[in-house]
Image (cartoon, rainbow, N blue to C red):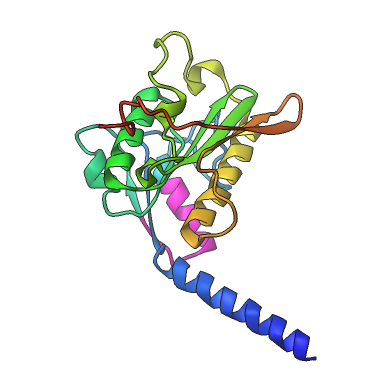
Amino acid sequence: MKSARRGNSVCSRRASSWSARAASARRCSFISPRQVSGRSASPTPTGSIVGALKVDSARDALASINPGVRVETHPLRLGPENAEALIGGYGLVADGSDNFDTRYLLTDLCFRLKKPLVAAALSPFEGQISTFKPYLGAGHPCYRCLFRDPPPPDLVPRCETAGILGAVAGVLGTLQAVETLKELLQLGESLDGTLLLYDALRARFHSIRIAKDPECPTCGRP
């Protein structure tokens, strides 16, 4: 009985600690100019209306699950002129964009503002995800350490052009949600410094370590 009470006490303290950390994450923001479409690459919440803004659909879905979270919506494109104002008040950024301009913009900005960046990307039957915290110094790479420069515009088609299996987007979205919560609640092992790859056609995951590039234009030596 003593062991059981001790175990319950540990669980109780742990749950209280998680609740305290989660209390500071009661506000989130969705940024996207896009509308829900019948051929959307990413899964949309049940009941979403075709033509509705994706940010509104996501807000309504989250409110139905957890009404205690305050959600801000921004139905616009993230760009150099507004990015810092939009993300500056948040402790973490989750990037699910399908264009390299946004990915590199967030890479540079999150490094400068010292914010964790949980980034996921898709191709028709594959996906990848990592967490980047290069502001922590040695051993903590950024996205540019992995991919120094964007590819030519015609080399990697956008999701809306290439076509994405929606279930693959669902897998990566779920993984991104888990990694985001791990960072906010300080749980488990971070993907910082690791790229997790998903191959849907072979039903396999594998990971590779990312080395910090000392010559990286974002986080390398000044």
Residue 130 point in image, percent of width and height: 52, 38
Q: Is residue 148 shown left or right of residue 178?
A: left
Q: Which of 37 and 216 is in front in this view?
A: 216
Is residue 86 visible to the viewer in this orientation of the structure? yes
Image point 32% across, 47% down: which residue? Answer: 114
Rendering coords of residue 14 (x, y %): 58, 74
Q: In which quarter of the image is the C terminus?
A: top left
Q: From the viewer's perspective, tell me whether residue 95 is left or right of residue 204.
A: left
Q: Is residue 180 above or below residue 124?
A: below
Q: Is residue 29 left or right of residue 181?
A: left
Q: Could one spot residue 77 in this view of the protein?
A: no
Residue 220 among those drawn in magenta? no
| Residue at horizontal 46 percent and vertical 48 percent from the top | 58
- Percent from the top left, x then y, of residue 34? 39, 33
Look at the image and give the residue range highlighted in magenta: 56-71
At x 33%, y 34%, the residue is: 219
Quadrant including the N terminus: bottom right
Q: Which residue lies furthest to the right in this view?
A: 1
Report x, y in % for residue 141.
Answer: 44, 36
Please identify the residue farthest to the bottom as the structure is shown. Answer: 1
Q: Nearer the viewer, residue 9 or 60?
A: 9
Number of dots carrying numbers: 0
Residue 65 belongs to magenta span? yes
Point 42% across, 63% down: residue: 69
Q: Quadrant of residue 126?
A: top right
In the displayed structure, would residue 70 be above or below residue 109? below
Which residue is situated farthest in the left direction here? 81
Helix, strand or loop: magenta stretch: helix
Within the image, what quadrant is residue 188 found in? bottom right
